[in-house]
Amino acid sequence: MSDLHTQQTEALAAIAAAADLAALDEQRVATLGKKGWVSAALKTLGQMSPEERAAAAPAIQAIRTEIAEAIEAKKAALEAAELAERLASETVDLTLPAPAAPKGSIHPVSQVMDELAEIFADLGFAVATGPEIEDDWHNFTALNMDETHPARAMHDTFYFPDKTLASSSEAVGQQKTPDGKDILLRTHTSPVQIRSMLAQGAPIRIIAPGRVYRSDSDATHTPMFHQVEGLVVDKGIHLGHLKWTLETFFKAFFEREDIVLRLRPSYFPFTEPSVEVDVGYSNEGGRRVVGGHGDAPGHAWMELGGSGMVNRRVLEFAGVDPYEYQGFAFGLGIDRIAMLKYGMNDLRAFFDGDARWLTHYGFSPFDQPTLSAGVGARA
Ligand code: PHE
């Protein structure tokens, strides 16, 4: 027993002297640990006679408790000292300038879509959407392009799966809708015309901005790009309404009055008559700037999209009575008008996700387009 008391005195001294938590833990292992001497002493109780045990057990337990308490107390003291030291050494200088917070910006395409929606909302248009994964009925057939129509080929369509790759197996997945229609990535936003008319009938006044896909790629074409569809169906709608709407829109969008549009006869299966929309521009300081007559000296025309009076066959497909209602529709390239307004010259950079490009051409999230404060962003 006196041996144990000597060991106890030594252990308590070592605990008191422990310089850090690691040294303290060494003491814990040496005493209370599985192979520590206190644990060993406790084990000897088993071999003692009942009388010996009655005398020794309380003494050994008392040693164990005293050492455990000493370790706990020392641990709390060491931790408190460590915290105090950290608090004293770690200081924050509140007079230093704040570090630059990483900040995002609004992509020009998003910005222009917001601008479009703002201007057209003022003209009484609602924003409609449709799926990017379409079926060939909405994308082609209901737009007066039947199975054999040559205009289908013009669109360089991405089918599900790609018809050129899918000769062999079903493993590529679903190839048709349950009712047997081909599935594809929509090649234009015009199927939203059909979906909107089927859903809400006439009269109707919508724009439908969104992504479209064609197998095409160079400086002015990417396999994915953006269009905004416009559709107005009502009684007595004529080409003059289309022209006024486009002119009013472009004046508001480019924030200048000298916008001159040229409506050029064209062909789309879903409009009759069809007109392509060109805008006059000039090159100023290596940058295209809209405004003025495209035939004037130093000016030219740029194509912005297609439009026309909705073909009566399309109204019929969409369940609207063509004897009662007429309409006009247009489809404009959003990326194109964004380039023209904000001065980018390569479309591909729009979709590279290059942070430097986004920093240069992106817009502040706080700069929301509003008619009262101006729809154009201050870059
Ligand atoms: N959908 C046509 C295209 O993508 C554009 C268009 C829309 C033409 C509406 C006429 C009317 O080229």
Image (cartoon, helix red, strand yellow):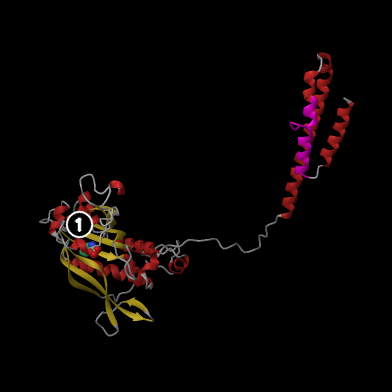
Disc 1 under 8 Å from ligand 1? The reply is no
Q: Residue furthest top?
A: 50
Mark 1 secondary-structure assignment: loop
Image: magenta residue range: 20-41
In which of the image's four quarters is ligand 1 placed?
A: bottom left
Screen quadrant of the N terminus:
top right
Q: Which residue is outermost to the front? A: 168
Splitting the image into 4 quarters, where does residue 117 fall?
Answer: bottom left
Disc 1 marks a residue whose amino acid type is Phe
x%, y% of residue 292?
Answer: 28, 79
- 234, 46: nearer the viewer: 46
Q: Is residue 170 above or below residue 278?
A: above
Q: Nearer the viewer, residue 326 or 358?
A: 358
Q: Mark 1, residues whose alpha carbon is within 10 Å: few (<14), some, or many (≥20)?
A: many
Say which residue label 1 marks.
140
Q: Identify the image quadrant of the C terminus.
A: bottom left
- Horizontal placement of 139 versus 66: left or right? left
| Number of numbered markers | 1
Is residue 315 toward the left or the right of residue 160 in the image?
A: left
Quadrant in the picture for residue 270: bottom left
